[in-house]
Image (cartoon, rainbow, N blue to C red):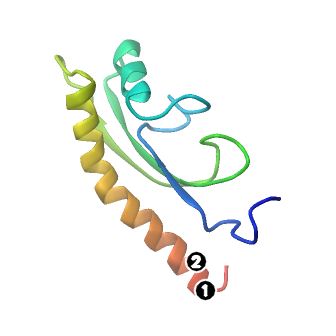
């Protein structure tokens, strides 16, 4: 593919529990708006490897948080961001460990 030798080494973070609320056009506040509109009780973030499809690569880490009554985009985004700050380093550490082992 067109990954320039970086297959399995490009990591993305997405502000939902993929595959829910992912794909083309789903980023930033658009994700949180869709979560709130759907009325789900739980959301979170996903750290995944990048492949040729939007938000479709192998999942490394998912962290969850509740959607609370009265949440708006800002409050929900802040809660998801707290989880992203934990999940992203975990996902990066997984990739580094795999690379160290020759994978």
Q: Any mark on residue 23, and which? A: none
In the image, residue 68 lies at what x, y percent? 20, 24
Q: Quadrant of residue 42?
A: top left
Which of 91/28 is in front?
28
Most distant residue in the left direction: 70
Residue appearing at x 41%, y 14% in the figure:
38
In the displayed structure, does residue 101 sit left or right of residue 93? right
| In the image: residue 35, left or right of residue 82 | right
Element type at mark 1: loop
Give the position of the C terminus as an image quadrant: bottom right
Q: Residue at x 28, y 35 (%)?
A: 77
Q: Position of residue 52 (x, y in %)?
A: 73, 48
Residue drawn at point x = 40 percent, y = 44 percent: 45
Q: Residue furthest right?
A: 1
**Residue at x 34% of width, y 18% of height:** 36
**Disc 2 crowd, CA 10 A, few/some/many (<14, 14-19, 20+):** few
- Residue under pointer 2: 98
Residue of label 1: 101
How far apart are the two marked residues, 2 and 1, measured between alpha carbons?
Answer: 5 Å
Element type where label 2 sits in the image: helix
Q: Are marks 2 and 1 in contact (CB under 8 Å)?
A: yes
Above or below for 95 versus 88: below
Instruction: Say if 3 sits above or below 19 in the image.
Output: below
Residue 73 lies, in percent from the top left, at 28, 25
- Count of marks placed on residues: 2
């Amino acid at each position: 593919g067109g990954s320039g030798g970086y297959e399995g080494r490009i990591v993305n973070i997405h502000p939902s529990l993929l595959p829910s609320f992912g794909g083309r056009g789903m980023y930033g506040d658009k994700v949180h708006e869709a979560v709130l509109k759907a009325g789900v009780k739980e959301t979170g973030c996903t750290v995944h490897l990048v492949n040729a499809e939007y938000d479709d690569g192998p999942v490394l880490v998912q962290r969850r948080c509740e959607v609370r009554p009265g949440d708006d985009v800002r409050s929900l985004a802040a809660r998801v961001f707290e989880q992203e700050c934990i999940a992203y380093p975990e996902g990066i550490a997984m990739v580094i460990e795999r690379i160290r082992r020759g994978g």
